[in-house]
Amino acid sequence: MTSELVNGKGLSLVPKTDVKQGLKDFKSDQEVRWCPGCGDYAILAAVQSFLPELGLKRENIVFVSGIGCSSRFPYYLNTYGFHSIHGRAPAIATGLAASRPDLSVWVITGDGDALSIGGNHLIHALRRNVNLNILLFNNRIYGLTKGQYSPTSEVGKITKSTPMGSLDRPFNPISLAIGAEASFVARTIDSDRKHLQSVLREATAHRGTSLVEIYQNCNIFNDNAFEQLKDPAIRDDITLRLEHGQPIVSASKAVVRAANGGIEVVAREGVSDDQILVHDAHNPDPSVAFALSRLDEPAFEHVPIGIFRQVDRPAYDVLMAEQLEAAATQKGPGDLSELLLGGDTWRIS
Amino acid sequence: MTKQVQQLDRVIIRFAGDSGDGMQLTGDRFTAGTAEFGNDLSTLPNFPAEIRAPAGTLPGVSSFQLHFADHDILTPGDAPNVLVAMNPAALKANLGDLPRGADIIANTDEFTKRNLQKVGYAANPLEDDSLGEWRVHAVPLTSLTVKALEGFELSKKDAERSKNMFALGLLSWLYHRPTEHTITFLEQKFAKKPDIAKANIAAFQAGWNYGETTESFSVSYEVKPARLAPGVYRNISGNQALAYGLIAASVQSKLPLFLGSYPITPASDILHELSKHKRFGIRTFQAEDEIAGVGAALGAAFGGALGVTTTSGPGVALKAETVGLAVTTELPLIVVDVQRAGPSTGMPTKTEQTDLLMAMFGRNGESPVPIVAPMSPSDCFDAAVEAARIAIKYRTPVMLLSDGYLANGSEPWRLPEISELPDISQTFTTEPNGADGEFLPFKRDTETLARPWAIPGTPGLEHRIGGIEKADGTGNISYDPDNHDLMVRTRAAKIAGIDVPALDVDDPDGDADVLVIGWGSTYGPIAAAVRRIRKSGGKVAQAHLRHLNPLPANTGDVLKRYDKVLLPEINLGQLALLLRAKYLVDVISYNRVRGLPFKAEELAGVIQDVIDSDQ
C-alpha cells in the first residue's frame, strides 16, 4: 500500500525520505489546547499517525490554516506551518502551492472559516484545482467565538445569536464543492479513524485540490451533532458507504434510480442487485455525485460517507509551470538588459 | 508656396475627442515620434472611467496632453498651445484650459446641430465670434479622411474611424515629427487586417499632405532635440517602469517573482505587463479578489518567492488584514498602491495622493509598514527595486505608493546599466540558530532586527508562524504581557531603523527662507514651479521625500533650517499631519483634490505668496 501511494502521482513531485518515520516525528513540542472531548483530537491523532505512511521528507509538508478551533492544528504538527487569518487559508496556500510543486500542502479549516468568511477562496481553489488537501472540519457551529450558528447549522438552530432560531438555509459542503468544479470530494467522520485515514490516503494520491469534509463533534456547543452516525443501533442503517465500483448500500437500504430520473433511497429488501446504483467516483459527469450529496437532506436519514468524486484534471501549479517553460523555450530565458532595451530606444551622446 | 518654419523651445499639445475617437492612441503615437526625434517630453492622458460614454457628450471626452521641449522638462505642461478638438464636446470640455492665442484645430464635420445641442451650444462656436481669442483652424477632418480613402474598399464608418490618423498626420507635419515609426506601427498593429493598415497609413499621409498644401496652415514649427544626459533612452509610463522594476528586483534578488493581483484601475497595466514576461520565471496570478491576491503573494513569500500584489486604494482597504499578517509574521511582501481619487470608488481614472495615511496606519494594532513613493514615471522603476530591497532585507511588507498620474504619464527614461543596479539578494536560513541546535524563527539579526527566512523544504528548520502573538525567539504562541510589549516595540524599531538615504535639499545659494517640500508625483510640478521662482529672481529651496516611512533621519533638521516650509499635496494635508506631529514644525499646507496634477504656474503663485507673506 505504502509503496503504491508513494509512487502515486499525487505526491510524485514531493521528495521522499529513506528515514523511517513514526507518529512521534510529526508531533510538535506544543501543548495541544482544545476542549477535552473535542473531535479535533481524534483527527489530529489520525493525521499524525497517517503522515509517516507517506514517506515524505517532513520539511516538504506544510499545513496552512485560517481562524477557528480547527485552525490551531498546524501548531501541533512538526512540519512547516502557517496559521493565517480568517477564511484566507486557501488563498495563502494557493500562492504557496502554485509556486512550490515540491510541497505537500494541506489546508485545515472549519465550516465557518471555509464556508462563511472564506467561501469565495474555497470555491476558486476548487475550480482552479490547486494542489492542496483541504480538510474541512464541519461541526455545524461556531466554536471559537462561543456558539453562534454556522453556515452548516440546520434551519431553526437556537444559539446565542439566534434565540428564536436561525433563518439561513445551510450549505451542503459536498454539493458546494461539486458545484465549484472540484476534482476530488469526500466525506468522513472524526470517530472512524480507519475510514478517515483511507480517505486521506486517496486525497493525498490525488494531484489537484482534494476537499475532505470531516464531521467533527463539538462537545461544548453542538454536542452529538452526528450522533446518528455513531450510534451502534442505527449507524449501519443510515450510513451509505461510497466505494468506487461497489453498490451504494447501507445495512438495510439501497440507492436506486428513481422514476423521476433522479436517485432515491429504498429498503434494500426486495431490490435486486442489478437495480442498485453502482458508485462511479471517476465519472466525468458530476450529476450523480451531486445527487448523492443531496441524499442526507432533510434530516440525516441516510448519509453518504466516502469519496463522491475523484476525477483527473491537470493541477494548477503544473499548468502554470508549463506556461513558464513554454515562454522560456519559445523566447529564451529572461534577459533583463534585453527587456529594458526592448521597444523604441534612442541614444544621446 | 514655401511655408515658414518657426523655431520653438517647447510646445504643449492636447488631443481631445470622444472616447471612441482613438485619442489615447493618437497621443501615444505622437509621443513615440517625439521621443524618437529626441525631445524631452512628459505626457498626461486623461480619460473617463466609462469604456464608451454616450458619444458626443461631455462625460465621454477623452484627452491626451503632451509637452515636448528642446530642454529638460518636468511636467506635461499647464496649458496647451494647441488643442485638437474632434467634436464640440472636446472643444467645450477643454476650452477653459486654453490660454489666449492658442491654436484650435477643430473637426468641423462633427459640429453638427445635433452634436452642438448635446453639449449645450446654441450656435456653432466655429462660426460666431466666440472663439475670437484663439486661432481657429477649421478642418473637415472626417470628410477629408473619407475622401482620401475613396479608393479603398471600406465602409464609410470604417473610413471615418481613420480620422484620428489624419489628425496625427496633420500634427506630425505641423511639428516636423518623423513618420516612419507610425507607419511601421500601423503595419504591425493591423498585421492581420492589411486593408485597415493601408487605410490608416493612407489617412496619416493624407493628413501630412494636407498640412503641406492647405492655406489654413502657413507656419510649421520646429522644436530641436533636447540636450539630455548621454545614454540610451526610451519613453516609459509609470506602470510599465514599475513592472520592469519588479522584474529587475526579481533578477537582482535571485527570487522568483509571484504576483497576486485583481484587476483595478489604474493598476491593471502592471498585471498585464508582468504577465507578458513569464520567461523570467514570473508567476502572475489573477486572483478571485483583492484579498486572495495579497494572500497568494504572502503564501508564495512564505515559500521563498518575491511576493507582490498590485492594486489601487479600494484594494488596499481589502488587503489590510493580510498586510497585518505579513507585518507580524515578518515576511517580505510588496504592496503596490496606484492611488486614485477616493473615497470608495471615487474617480477611478483620476489621480490623488490620498492613501498615505491608510498606508501608514490602515491596519489593526501597531503595524508599521515602510512606505516608498516614486517621484516620476521613470522613477517607478527605481522605487520598485528599492521597495524590494527593504522588503527582503528587513522581512517586512512594503507599501509602494504610485498614483494615476505617474501610472499613465510617460517620459523619456535613461536606461540604467544592469551593473548599476543594486544587489539585493539574501540567502535563506538553512542552519539552526539556537544554542541547543534548535531553530528559533524569531531570533533576530542584531543589526537589522530581521528574523531568519527559512523556507519549506529546508530540513531541520520546520516551524510554525501565524497571526497570533509570538514569543520572542521561539515564535511559540504567547499571551505574556511583557513579551507582547517587547514584540510591538521590536517590530516598530525594526521599521524605524531601516536605512534610507538622507533628504537632499536643493538650495542653490543656501540662503532661501522658504522650503517647499513634497512627496510622490508632485515632484515635477513643484520643481517646475521652483524653476519659475528662481528665474524671476526669487529664492526658494526644494526637498522631495521618496521614503515616507521611515522618514530620512535628517528630515527634522532640514525642516527646522527654514523660516517657512510649504507642502503642496493632492490631499487635505496627510503628510503635513505627519510632519507636524513628528517634528513640531508649522508646515504650511497647500491642497487641491481635483483628480488632476498640480500646475507649475499655480504652484509658483503659491510659493511666491509664501515668500511674500510676513508670517
Image (tube, rainbow, N blue to C red):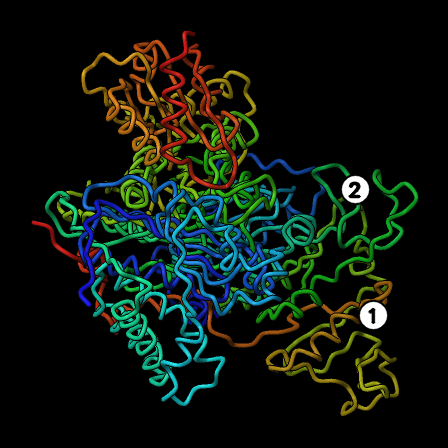
Query: Looking at numbered disc 2 in the image, what kind of residue is underneath it?
Result: Gln
Residue at horizontal 56%, vertical 24%?
B479
Q: Nearer the viewer, residue B246 or B114?
A: B114
Q: Nearer the viewer, residue A228 or A100?
A: A100
**CA separation in Å, label 1 and label 2:** 31 Å
Q: Which residue is mark 1?
A: A237
In the rendered image, residue A175, in percent from the top left (x then y), is placed at 71, 67
Residue at horizontal 55%, vertical 68%?
A202
* The label number, if any, that marks residue A338 in the structure image: none
Looking at the rendering, which quadrant does residue B445 occupy?
top left
* Mark earlier in primary sequence (1, 2): 2
In the rendered image, residue B176, in percent from the top left (x then y), is placed at 21, 60
Crowding near the residue tagged with mark 1, few <14, some 14–19, many ≥20 C-alpha atoms within 10 Å: some
Left or right side of A95 for B523: left
Crowding near the residue tagged with mark 2, few <14, some 14–19, many ≥20 C-alpha atoms within 10 Å: many
Residue at horizontal 81%, vertical 80%?
A254
Closer to the eye: label 1 or 2: 2
Q: Nearer the viewer, residue A136 or A277?
A: A136
Judging from the image, mark 1 belongs to the subunit labelled A
Looking at the rendering, which quadrant does residue B437 occupy?
top left
Q: Can the viewer see residue B97? A: yes
Q: Secondary structure at mark 2?
A: loop
Q: Which residue is mark 2?
A: A148
Query: Looking at numbered disc 1 in the image, what kind of residue is underneath it?
Result: Asp
Q: Can the viewer see residue B456? A: no
Left or right side of B311 for B411: left
Looking at the rendering, which quadrant does residue B2 occupy?
bottom left
Judging from the image, mark 2 belongs to the subunit labelled A
